[in-house]
Amino acid sequence: MKVVEIRNLTKTFGTFIAVDSVNLSVGKGERYALIGPNGAGKTTLLKMLVGLLLPGSGNAAICGHDIVREPLAAKKHFGYVSDDPSAYDYLTGSEFLTMTGRLRGLAGAELDKRIARLVPLFPISGILRQSMTRYSRGNKQKIAFLASMLAEPELLIIDEPIVGLDSASIDTMGKTLVDYAARGNTVLFVTHILDFAQKFAGRVGVMHMGRITKELSINKSIKLGNLL
Amino acid sequence: MYILGTLFRADLILMKRWFAAGIYSRLFVASLFFLLFGGIAYALYGISNIFFNNLAAFDRYGQMTAAYIIHAAIAVVLWLSLTSSVAAASGTVLTSSPSLTYLLTLPVPRVWITTWTYLKTISANLTVMLFVFVPVTLSYAGAFDMLSLGFLLRTVLVLSCLVIVSGSVGMLVALALVGWLRGHEYHFSVIGFGLFFGGMVWILKLVFPPALSRIYDATSEQFAVLFAGLPLNNPVLPTFWLAQTVTSGISGGTLIAVLLTAAVLLISLGVQIRRFVPVILAEHSRPYLKNLPEYWKNRLSHFRYPLLIKDWLSLVRLPSETGYGLFLISIAAFFFLSLSYGTKNISHPGNWQVQLIVFSFSWLMFFTIALLLRFIFPLVSREGRSAWYLFSLPKPRTEILLSKVLLAVLSDIPLFLLALIVWRVLPFAAGYRQIMFGASIMIIFFLSLFQTFLGAIAPNFSLGHDPEKVSTSGMGILTLGLSVAVTAEACMLVSMMITGRISQFLMTGVLFAVGIFLTVLLWLTAGKAMQRYEW
């Protein structure tokens, strides 16, 4: 069973076809990157997968659960970070992580242990008790990323993982994704930064005008810069 | 001057674009707004009419008492306007509006930025005050045959003086205080609330001294002595000159008041031009890194409904929201305390008790609707840019709605307390207190549920950062309309119950049945709508 299975998924806004009969399968342990120009439909595709947009036609399943018929079962299997990682400015980073854990069924010592394990990934312990109003975009991105991994879901879906991050954090983010997938999990992300996809993705799908026009496995001989 | 004109033209274009985005729906919303304000103005006019016509029966003494009430209203409006100006001006300086922030990056001289901001504030305040104050003075003029163009112009002149003075002083106070405010918003909110409420009570005691209650039964000689001794009847008070301008015409006092207003305006504008932009820049440049106590994190760890805590924090952690809520509640408390002072020990003509109960009930509901529309209706929309987080979680959307419902019920508590104050302190016949308290609790509860569900039917996530705009959107106006319709029905039933046309049991039963019916209907509709959200 594939972790992500998409069949003829389509989404239109009025007469504009944002996603056009997309088929995609991502297996366990894979790191799959969707790349493509602005307006290609990458974010729309992810939003349908995570339940923020209703598909026009076609179907998609996450870990065997149809995203329309069994949305809650599907959502239990992934963590998601939006391309705009704004999340409740009035909470502190620590409160946000705790709330996410609670909403994903974690509690008590186990929740504290997981937060304590994740936080050192990025140098953010000094700001965790501050209101997120003052967080930079990069720090919001880090907190949202940590929150998405808190329940250790089988699938991470991340829209633009490195926008706003400094170079050290980009490297940490990439290595964390690689480690996460190495533990038997799956990572699906959208990026404009081809170097990042080249370095940290295992397979790449190129989206153009709502369709996945090309798919390829990354190896040293392939230069993604030539694809777009 | 050209820059000022450009800035106002930009505001005009913004307004035109707002209409152009959906001409019919926007015209509908605008018409509803005018209808609403018109309705409030008409209600104020009608209520004041009853009051002043009652006083008109006492001839010259009645007119003098009515003039005193106008003076009292001016004093009250001045205090309210002054305190709200300080709060609003502090908010403007402390929070950065995108348009103002953008303007600060352009080569626009600060004199024009300051003048533009100031003029907009003054004209908005003047418009609101006109709707509130003019109906009262119009009913006064009608009751005592004084209505003329001159009277109207004098009213506008007095109101302009009040708004300009309060707006000017409010900004000066805000500019002086803002350095200490940053980082201590909550302490200052509490102190400000205490000062505001203390000031209100002091003004009430000043306006309605014990001597005023004796005035209704006094002989002519006693009246003259008692009236002259009333604290507001002091010719050196600036509010006395303003009140005289409305009730008696232009005098030397009017000229002094206008000159004083002009002086305050010039001084304030001078200071604002020098200080407004630098203070804003200084405040926005100041680092604001403060660790918050872990109290709420610990509650989030253990409490059964973490979403409820999140929603609660979304209200109490934003000083502007807390401040506005406290302000509205205290205005309501002030209003009813004034009413209690004003109606204590006065002679009660025929249907006075009926009028007083319906009047108090409708105003209690007015404040309830205002608070709910501002805080409860936008609850779902407030998810705003963070909606991605909530709606991608493995949580049923009905559970998300439940947290909003719980918060709405929790937010009813201050309104229940307000209802308790109303039905305890006002001079109602003892037999009505309990039933009216019960009816008020029931309607407040149902209204909060209606508003929560209506807010979930068509939320406006793009306006989530600005709950005020959410509550004045098309759906907000529709919600307002439904709330007003329910309240009107409740007022009608209350009136029928007091006049003995229906029993208390029937009134309660009908209110309950309508409440339950609408709750179930809106709950089902909201639940269904939530499944279709796209973000």
Image: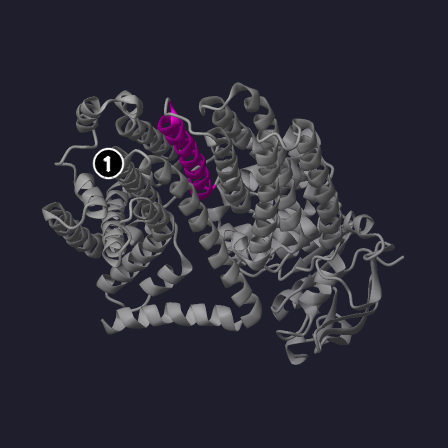
* Farthest left residue in view: B252
What is the chain identity of the residue bearing mark 1?
A: B
* Farthest right residue in view: A1
Front-lying residue, A138 or B102: B102
x then y, percent, for residue B40: 46, 49
Front-lying residue, B471 or B346: B346
Q: Is residue B335 magenta?
A: yes
* Residue A52 location, quadrant: bottom right
Front-lying residue, B204 or A187: B204
**In the image, residue B54 above or below residue A89:** above
Callout 1 crowding tier (Cα within 10 Å): few <14, some 14–19, many ≥20: few
The answer to whether any part of residue A92 appears in the image is no
Q: Is residue B346 magenta?
A: no
x then y, percent, for residue B415: 53, 32
**In the image, residue B382 above or below residue A40:** above
x then y, percent, for residue A209: 70, 78
**In the image, residue B285 above or below residue B236:** below
* Three-letter amino acid code at the position of disc 1: Arg
Indicate the quadrant containing the C terminus of chain A: top left, top right, bottom left or bottom right.
bottom right
Q: Give the side of residue B274 with respect to residue B531, left or right.
A: left
Q: Residue at x 37, y 49 (%)?
A: B135
Residue at image mark 1: B60
* Residue A33 location, quadrant: bottom right
Q: Residue at x 62, y 44 (%)?
A: B486
- Tell me the colour scheme of the image: one colour
Q: Give the side of residue B440 with respect to residue B52, left or right.
A: right
x then y, percent, for residue A213: 76, 78
Q: Residue at x 40, y 27 (%)?
A: B340
The answer to whether any part of residue B178 appears in the image is yes
Q: Main secondary structure of the magenta part?
A: helix
Magenta extent: B318-344
Q: Residue at x 61, y 42 (%)?
A: B489
